[in-house]
Image (cartoon, rainbow, N blue to C red):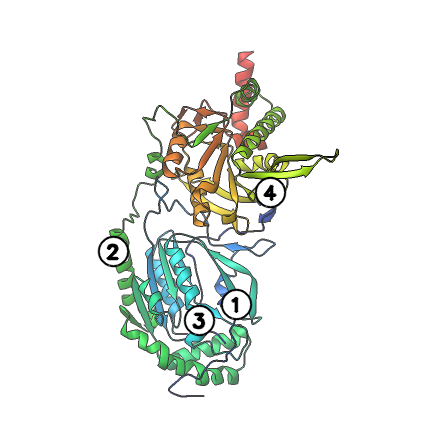
Amino acid sequence: MREHVERHVTIADPLPDASTDATSIHNDINNSGSTAPPLPLHRCMRTISGSKSEDHLLTTESGRRIYTKGRPPWYDREGKILKQPYVVGICGGSASGKTTVARRIIERLEMPWVLTEGQHHLATRNEYNFDHPQAFDFDLMCETVRRLREGKNVEVPVYDFTNHRRDKQPKLMYGADVLIFEGILAFHNKELVDLMDMKVFVDTDPDTRLARRLVRDIQDRGRDVEGVLTQYLRFVKPAFDTFIAPGMKIADIIVPRGGENEVAIDLIVKQVKTQLAERGYDASKNPYSQRAGMVQKDLPLQLPRTLTVVSQTPQVRGLHTFIRDRRTPRDEFNFYSDRLMRILIENAMNFMPFEDATVTTPTMEKFVGKKKAAQICGVTIMRAGETMEHALRAVVKDCKMGKILIQTNEKTKEPELFYLRLPKNIHRYKVLLMDATVATGAAAMMAIRVLLDHDVLEENILLLSLLMAGTGVHSLAYAFPKVTLLTTAVDPHINELYYVIPGMGNFGDRYYGTEAVAACDDSSNDEDNTE
């Protein structure tokens, strides 16, 4: 039986990930010895331990879960990662209290983003020695920690101790300000140790560890006393003496008694905060500075070359007239918006790669034409961006869809990432990122950063929007010079509430009919006065 290590996130209950169809999110949410015995030759699938502490996580029908809930920007106005996460490695024997120490550190840090990752294992058979280094996929561990340090996503298989088999749905983890890595052999691999900024060894009395292991395996895993003791004497104790205990020699801090040692935990927390401050983390930073910093007062006179504005034909100008008119009824607003979206998507196809294709006509003659030379997928920035899905599917019949939910924090006015669902292997696609309007570009910048973290090339991203503000255009073009921007109009200004001026109002509210009642009443009164 493998070592059991819990993983935690300090953030609130996360929203789910899901499959890659075009369904709205609203449908998703409802023997004793001095050396360890050799291992069997059989190699196992990569897995990690599950955790009963994750029972609170919400899952979609497909079972996907993601550790992101209201995450604020983790990049600067240039789209670059703000700082490298601080990595804390925690090692110790089985049931020594590693997870308790990790949890206490998280509680004391009081930071918005601390991620605890459990160890990675190989597992298929119960008689496998999970306390031996060969039972661990250190290559996978190193790659996972390395990607998390870079702010990128990692997808990790999960082992269910109750059913003794791999979970069909992997866990999706995202980077954080602090990454706590815990495992019985966390200090065994030098490459992995080199990725750690702080190394903590939890030293607990052997009798205490055995007692905890008995309770855990009997109550939580349905095993009997004899089986637990046999495994402990045959595998666990020899492995601790041979492979785990030597880790104390390289530890920066040794914590006796585990989570009960308040002094040691306070020392660790103070050191982490000090190191984060040296890396530029400032918990008291003005929350308005990031988005406000994107609002440029003096804009360049010339629009960036990465921006393309749809030809301003009388039809396009006429559609904008209907859409911008505050008195346009909702059914007409939606009708003309859908028409404009179709024009926008058709223009976007001109930026997709095509190759020659020869077909035979009904008259048995050859015709040399074109066909698309790359896979295309759409990603909508919810909720206003979802309105563009129908137009995209009408143009690209086999297009896969993804969604990213980014909402503005009412207090900080910063964009926050709440949900994402992206097609598998999205890095192989040309991605059409869609949002109805772009004001400061803060939400679009976060969405682009998410795509880059999923290994999508910058030049493979095309941002589509019905309306963009000059501020957002310049901010995005400056941060991501290889991303193509396409819109049907560019307005010059945004106001103090970050609305585009003259703009078209809150597009999502107007399209879905969710405007505030008071606003509707005021609008009606104004119309009466005008008439």
What whole-number distance in Å separates the C-alpha atoms at marks 1 and 2?
36 Å
Under mark 1, the amino acid is Tyr
Q: Are marks 1 and 3 in contact (CB under 8 Å)?
A: no
What whole-number distance in Å separates the C-alpha atoms at marks 3 and 2?
33 Å
Q: Nearer the viewer, residue 175 or 220?
A: 175
Q: Is residue 294 above or below residue 141?
A: above
Under mark 4, the amino acid is Cys
Q: Earlier in the sequence, mark 1 or mark 4?
A: 1
Judged from this view, the residue extending furthest toward the front is: 365
Q: Are marks 1 and 2 in contact (CB under 8 Å)?
A: no
Q: Which residue is mark 2?
A: 274
Q: Which residue is mark 4?
A: 399
Q: Nearer the viewer, residue 415 or 437?
A: 437
Q: Is residue 462 left or right of residue 34?
A: right
Residue 420: image location, x then y, percent: 51, 47
What whole-number distance in Å separates the C-alpha atoms at marks 2 and 4?
48 Å
Q: Earlier in the sequence, mark 3 or mark 4?
A: 3
Q: Nearer the viewer, residue 315 or 21?
A: 315
Residue found at x 32% / y 38%: 289
Helix, strand or loop status at disc 3: loop
What whole-number distance in Å separates the C-alpha atoms at marks 1 and 3?
13 Å
Q: Is residue 252 above or below residue 477?
A: below
Q: Is residue 339 above or below residue 74?
A: above
Q: Which mark is residue 159?
A: 1
Say few, some or many: other residues with alpha carbon within 10 Å of mark 3 (under 14 / 14 to 19 / 20 or more).
many
Helix, strand or loop status at disc 2: helix
Residue 45: image location, x then y, percent: 52, 69
Say few, some or many: other residues with alpha carbon within 10 Å of mark 1 (under 14 / 14 to 19 / 20 or more).
many
Q: Which mark is residue 136?
A: 3
Q: Is residue 276 left or right of residue 127?
A: left
